[in-house]
Image (cartoon, grey):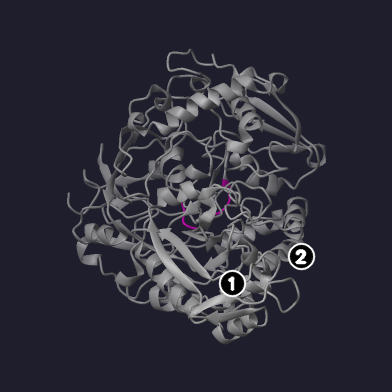
Amino acid sequence: MFQRRRNMGVAGVAAVAATALLAAGCGSSNSGTPSNSSSSVKNAVATLPIVTGTGANCIYPFTGTQCYSVANYEDFMYQMQLPLYQFGNNTSNNVTVDYPLSPADAPIYKNGGKTVVINLKGWKWSNGESVDAKDLILDLNMLEAEKANFAGYSPGLLPDNMSSYSATGPDQVTLNLKQAYGDTWFTYNQLAILEPMPMAWDVTSLTGAPGSGGCTTDSAADGWAKCKAVFTFMNAQNKDTSTYATNKLWQVVDGPYHLTAYNVNGNFTLVPNPKYSGAPKASVTLKFVEYTSDTAVYTGLKTGALTTDGPNIQIPDSDLAPAGKGFLPPSNPLASAGYNLDVAYSYGIGYAYINFNNPTYGPAFKQLYFRQALMELNNQKAMSSSVGRGYNYPTTSGVPPQPSAGNPFISSAMTENGGQGPYPYDPAKAKALLASHGWKVVGGVLTCESAGTAASDCGAGVAKGTQAKFAMAYTSGVSTQQSFVEILKSGFGQAGIQLTAEPETFDTLLGDTVPCTPKESRCNWTFLYLGGWLFNGPGFEPTGEPLYQTGSPNNSGSYSNPTMDSLINATHTSGSMTVFHNYANYTATQVPALWMPWNTGIVAVSNKLHNATWSPFLTWYPQYWTCSNASCGTTG
């Protein structure tokens, strides 16, 4: 998935002048799904899959990293609760903000970029109240009070970079900033984290009247005590997943859908919200059904049990012929079952978190030579071609390498060595590098034999006798990830590094992504592989503040580097591509995470489903969907 969010799939915009170029470069190839259809039926039901352990498990949008996933936001919350601004639209190549689909008009920048005026459109909540200035103030106040518990927060950025904010009209909020920012970056990476909240959520009990919690009118004078009390209550309700479909809090929506059935395993139903203010209004019910794995999903497609596997589950690469032109397979194995195939680009990067705070191995991970050696033992090229069958490609930096055409963000270091980046697969070079820094294979295991800080030593804090025995937790039920980890294990083994593969559910892994300190018992992990990061918020521009800035909640491995912080900060105020490329090159050479392949997915779409497309942001807009039979699939 930005995004914003972590995405389990491995098959989720800087200067103003660059935005149009990027939009033009992100295309998707459609192999037959009609763009429109006059043949549609009322009350149709589309059936979509969820892999066990990867479905939505949070419903309150003001959440920490344990909830920050595409499954929770794009697939679930954003169908019911709209962010201030929507990104992407119902086309396959849009990576820009979509104001017509957003509850607010385009922001107005004044005072040289130090003042931002936001005008809401006066859309309605399902209880009849307006989505207005006070709803956005509630969100901003909550952000001031509980920023440490919000995964979209990065230290020094929103709300820290505001000097003040206020409702300057019934439907208008004005932000005064401490310094001038570029309007594209501020819209795409700052305003993107905001989401108006209904007064029904400003409460401290289920019997409280809307607004009775007092967070909307709270201030720093009391230490945001009222907002903190509201957050405590709402967070508790968020954790009570058994009541999602019945709790009156979650029935107040402003999106195209509302929830009528739910269980945490992945089975839930979204029904069109007739009071949705936007256009078009949804007409197709969405029924999500649990499957045990992506392989089981493919079986469901072959039997015609599903309408589509999109937006965020793709056909396993192993079930497709090697990719042909434009990433499409040369033939459609599901044609006889009544499906078309679509290419679904995702604007993201693949990686595994490295735990720089691991009490035993953190000191070794903090050595650049050691991370370089890990990459030289990481055969991404083989992963992409053998397992990924040409639908995958190596990640070389914190910036997406694809789509490449017209993409101004790709830097020189990213394209080195035929697209493998500055550290291509080279076990001999890795072994020599490790040996030159005091490591030796002892009893079959790479071991630090020369502790110290000299050029020929293992490095600061690495104890003599430290053995390179690591574990990689990865997403269970995703066959491609499992295969990638096995190839990585083989590559590491050539230098004597032992890697144990540990499958965990995606939801369990999300819970482990909260940054830890060396003294915490939960900080004993070494690598977490959830798939990767989709730049769909809070960073739609692929800058590094969500992932690599010191102290960021999504910096799960606790990477910290003052040069990186400085380069990230420079991208916020400068529209220069040179400034951005300096940052991109630094992430390529520094290896703040273990880069892994990313993919272009192939999605199956029933020929009875119309107007379904897949944005590179993994945002999707089923309110546009129509169906030509009641089941919206091949079995109807």
Q: Is residue 25 magenta?
A: no
Point out residue 491 in the picture as x, y percentages from the top left corner: 48, 78
Name the amino acid type tagged 2: Thr
Between 34 and 375, the residue placed more toward the observer is 375
Could you tell me if residue 90 is visible in this image? Answer: no
Point out residue 287 in the picture as x, y percentages from the top left corner: 28, 42
| Principal secondary structure, stretch drawn in magenta | loop
What is the quadrant of residue 141 in the picture? top right
Question: As displayed, is residue 434 above or below residue 626?
Answer: below
Could you tell me if residue 71 is visible in this image? Answer: yes
Point out residue 349 in the picture as x, y percentages from the top left corner: 54, 62
Q: Identify the element where label 2 is drawn.
A: helix
* Magenta highlight range: 90-97
Q: Identify the element where label 1 is drawn.
A: loop
Label 1 neighbour load within 10 Å: few <14, some 14-19, many 20+: some
Total numbered labels placed on residues in the image: 2
Name the amino acid type tagged 1: Gly
* Residue drawn at 44 percent across, 60 percent down: 473
In space, the residues marked 2 and 1 are separated at their CA atoms by: 44 Å
Point out residue 186 in the picture as x, y percentages from the top left corner: 69, 44
Residue denoted by label 1: 465
Lower position in the chain sequence, tag 2 or tag 1:
1
Residue denoted by label 2: 578
Between 474 and 213, the residue placed more toward the observer is 474
